[in-house]
Image (cartoon, rainbow, N blue to C red):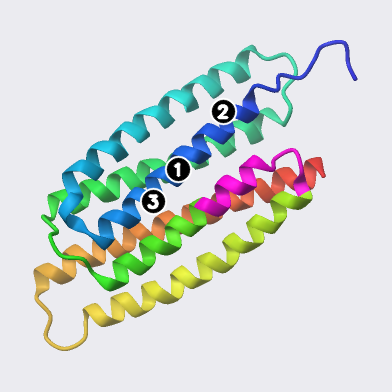
Amino acid sequence: MGLIPRDEKFFPMFNDVARILCESADLVAQLFADPSRLDEIATKVKDLEHQADGITHNVITRIDRSFVTPLDREDIHLLTSRLDDVIDLLDGTVRRVQMFHITTAGSHAAQLADVLKRAANQIEKAVNQLKKPKLMLEHTRALKALEEEGDAIYAQAVGALFSGTPDPLEVIKWKELFDKLEDAIDLCDDVSNVLESIALKNG
């Protein structure tokens, strides 16, 4: 070990952002299952988004101040940024539900939100295992399978939107929401790629 100790305080910060992502995704899943709680859930998600922004700012500040970091500085920055990106997108998705005045639950949206919730859960577990790369990789493999599941549901959802003689306004609203949910699942896969890279470098 070198004379200057590694700054281990990054790990609890990673865990905090991953927990916030998990809580946000859970709230989004609740929202698409029952839109009647929209305003309450929107407030909670916005609060979580602010918390994540604060932690992300602290991580970036700490990178500059730390002599020896436990991971590459670029990886620390990238992991925190990617986690924050997903949380920002979830907040944006909830905003759209408000703007579009969604009052009824859609089964495909609820299915996509459930995949997203499970992906966030795998991310939280993976981040908690950052010091154990082999265990972390088990969760990143699960994330790959969830992305494929999300792609299949998205294809069904969009196909169903355009079947028959749909209301054009409803098509526009729900297509936008499906896109945002799928984008969030894809961003979870981006987090998975960062975690896999960290595992390879530190395994």
Vertical arrangement, residue 174 with respect to residue 132, above or below: below
- Tell me which corner region of the image, top left, top right, bottom left or bottom right, holds residue 139: bottom right
In-front residue for pair 73/50: 50
Expressed as whole percent of the image width and height from the top left, the position of residue 110 reads 32, 66
The Cα atoms of the two marked residues, 3 and 1, are separated by 9 Å
Residue type at tag 2 = Met
Residue type at tag 1 = Leu
Numbered tag placed on residue 26 in the rendering: 3
Residue type at tag 3 = Asp
Vertical arrangement, residue 61 with respect to residue 51, above or below: above
Which residue is the extreme one toward the bottom? 164
Instruction: Tell us which disc is closer to us: 3 or 2.
Output: 3
Q: What secondary structure characterizes most of the magenta part?
A: helix
Numbered tag placed on residue 52 in the rendering: none
Residue matched to label 2: 13
Residue matched to label 1: 21
Disc 1 crowd, CA 10 A, few/some/many (<14, 14-19, 20+): many
Vertical arrangement, residue 40 with respect to residue 172, above or below: above
Expressed as whole percent of the image width and height from the top left, the position of residue 31 reads 26, 54
Expressed as whole percent of the image width and height from the top left, the position of residue 81 reads 51, 36
The Cα atoms of the two marked residues, 1 and 2, are separated by 12 Å
Q: Quadrant of the C terminus?
A: top right
Q: Quadrant of the N terminus?
A: top right
The magenta region covers 121-133
Disc 2 crowd, CA 10 A, few/some/many (<14, 14-19, 20+): some
The Cα atoms of the two marked residues, 3 and 2, are separated by 20 Å
Which of disc 1 and disc 3 is earlier in sequence? 1
- Tell me which corner region of the image, top left, top right, bottom left or bottom right, holds residue 170: bottom left
